[in-house]
Image (tube, helix red, strand yellow):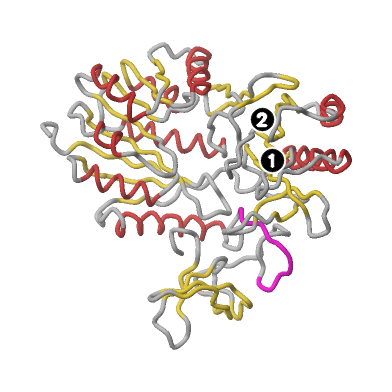
């Protein structure tokens, strides 16, 4: 399996590598070449002649099947693989990225830790609105490499509550004749449905719309609330820009609580609707426990721990006991407010949070570094920018714990840090995204030479 989630194949009688979405190791397939380059090609499966040992029948009705007619969902690209095979191949992807991108072949990559739940695990969903071929309103998920919507009536990786509320919102839009947003013209009103659910079975939902005016607002709120005691909040997110970004900058609370609460392990957190939380809460407990172990194992108490890209303070709260002071840096100002509140609600008194870009805020915070220090980083998929990488070479840092959702950018950054005085000692993959090729990981980098 390739890092992008496709299977790697060779055509009979050819040395050219062929990348095949929805393929499985050991498959013998009949496929159609869709693109050809000098040394590789891409193909789409037409028939599976002999299934490999990892292949299973995907349970989702709109998951890709060879020869299927109509649109299929691009969300879960690995439902056709058994779960033990998914874990094995995710470890393989991490190892491949470290060798090929990071130029590191002597790093211990541990077996992937399984998600406690592999179905119904996602606590956040963003569903675009569009049209079916018959001109009716569609709500579902994009087909691969397109913005064509595969209309859905069920989703096995979403909780039933989120699916039910999404279908109620879709029915309301259809009955009211709301104008669905058109990406090409930039016209129309309704863009996305958004829902965040928690372990208590509560939901915060929002409609994403181009303008703040809301036709039939009160009747929609009443209809959505009907027979839904688990509904905690309803928002309108205003997104006027002609971009492919899902959420806009403005949130208008229409009804209910301003935030949703979540329990992660022994700690309780509250998040504003647009703030970042890991989408798989039970697996997030596994991930944060790995991060805490990587930070504390074989180490004394740190004078300072920096939590970069700290979000609503989840990792800072989990790691606060390992330091005299923990300092979180986060660009989203609402998330910083949540982080302060979450520290207070969990009795954490040695944390403070800075609002600003990591690359610029680090210069201010670095003046406080003295004695033994550490950094925990959980950047977006593009990884660390050069300014953040330079700051991590500060001689006060004894170790860096790197949490990543992208093995490729992690390998790149770990390679750069290894050439700047660190040694990548171990990597622990954690499966936060069952049924997909995505994998989260925790990497531990220790300083080789404190005099660097």
Which residue, as the protein is rendered here, is positioned at the far bottom?
13
Q: Name the residue tied to disc 2.
A: 237
Tags 2 and 1 in contact by the CB under 8 Å rule?
yes
Q: Earlier in the sequence, mark 2 or mark 1?
A: 1
Q: Which mark is residue 35?
A: none
Q: Position of residue 395 (x, y in %)?
A: 17, 29
Residue 181, image quadrant: top right
Q: Which residues are magenta?
A: 66-75
Q: Position of residue 317 (x, y in %)?
A: 44, 22
Q: Which mark is residue 192?
A: 1
Which of 385 and 402 lies nearest the eye of the viewer?
385
**Residue 316 appears left or right of 178:** left
Looking at the rendered structure, the number of numbered marks drawn on it comes to: 2
Task: Say which quadrant the C terminus sits in.
Answer: top left
Which of 221 and 36 lies nearest the eye of the viewer?
36
Q: Is residue 103 magenta?
A: no
Which residue, as the protein is rendered here, is positioned at the far front?
185
Q: Does 111 appear above or below 63?
A: above
Q: Residue shown at 27%/39% (left/top)?
A: 445
**Tag 2 secondary structure:** strand
Q: Position of residue 225 (x, y in %)?
A: 82, 28
**Residue 176 appears left or right of 365:** right
Q: Residue shown at 57%/78% (left/top)?
A: 31
**Type of secondary structure dominating the magenta stretch:** loop
What crowding class fits label 2: few (fewer than 14 Cα within 10 Å), some (14-19), or many (20 or more)?
many
Residue 255, image quadrant: top right
């Amino acid at each position: 399996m390739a890092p992008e989630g496709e299977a790697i194949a060779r055509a009979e009688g050819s040395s050219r590598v062929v990348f095949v979405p929805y393929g499985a190791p050991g498959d013998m397939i009949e496929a159609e070449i869709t693109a050809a380059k000098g040394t590789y090609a891409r193909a789409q499966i037409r028939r599976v002649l002999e299934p490999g040992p990892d292949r299973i029948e995907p349970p989702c009705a709109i998951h890709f099947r060879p020869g299927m007619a109509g649109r299929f969902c691009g969300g879960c690209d690995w439902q056709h693989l058994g779960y033990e095979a998914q874990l094995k191949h995710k470890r393989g992807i991490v190892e491949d990225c470290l060798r090929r991108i990071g130029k590191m072949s002597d790093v211990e990559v541990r077996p992937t830790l399984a998600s406690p739940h592999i179905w119904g695990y996602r606590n956040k969903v963003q569903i675009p609105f569009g049209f079916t071929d018959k001109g009716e309103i569609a709500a579902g998920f994009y087909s691969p490499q397109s913005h064509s919507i595969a209309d859905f009536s069920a989703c096995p990786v979403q909780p039933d509550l989120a699916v039910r509320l999404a279908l109620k919102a879709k029915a309301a839009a259809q009955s009211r004749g709301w104008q669905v947003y058109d990406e090409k013209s930039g016209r129309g009103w309704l863009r996305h449905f958004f829902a965040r659910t928690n372990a208590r079975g509560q939901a915060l939902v929002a409609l994403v719309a181009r303008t703040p005016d809301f036709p039939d607002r009160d009747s929609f709120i009443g209809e959505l609330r009907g027979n839904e005691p688990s509904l905690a909040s309803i928002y309108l997110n205003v997104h006027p820009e002609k971009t492919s970004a899902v959420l806009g900058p403005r949130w208008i609370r229409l009804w209910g609580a301003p935030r949703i609460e979540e329990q992660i392990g022994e700690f309780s957190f509250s998040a504003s609707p647009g703030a970042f939380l890991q989408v798989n809460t039970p697996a997030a407990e596994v991930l944060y426990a790995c991060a805490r172990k990587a930070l504390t194992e074989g180490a004394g108490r740190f004078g300072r721990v920096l939590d970069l890209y700290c979000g609503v303070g989840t990792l800072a709260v989990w790691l606060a006991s390992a330091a005299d002071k923990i300092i979180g840096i986060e660009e989203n100002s609402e998330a910083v407010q949540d982080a302060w509140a979450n520290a207070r609600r969990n009795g954490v008194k040695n944390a403070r949070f800075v609002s600003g870009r990591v690359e610029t805020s680090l210069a201010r915070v670095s003046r406080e570094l003295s004695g033994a220090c550490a950094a925990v980083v959980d950047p977006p998929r593009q990884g660390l920018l050069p300014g953040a990488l330079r700051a991590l070479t500060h001689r006060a840092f004894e170790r860096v714990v790197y949490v990543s959702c992208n093995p490729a950018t992690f390998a790149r950054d770990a390679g750069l840090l290894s050439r700047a005085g660190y040694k990548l000692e171990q990597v622990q993959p954690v499966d936060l995204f069952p049924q997909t090729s995505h994998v989260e990981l925790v990497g531990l980098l220790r300083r080789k030479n404190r005099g660097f």
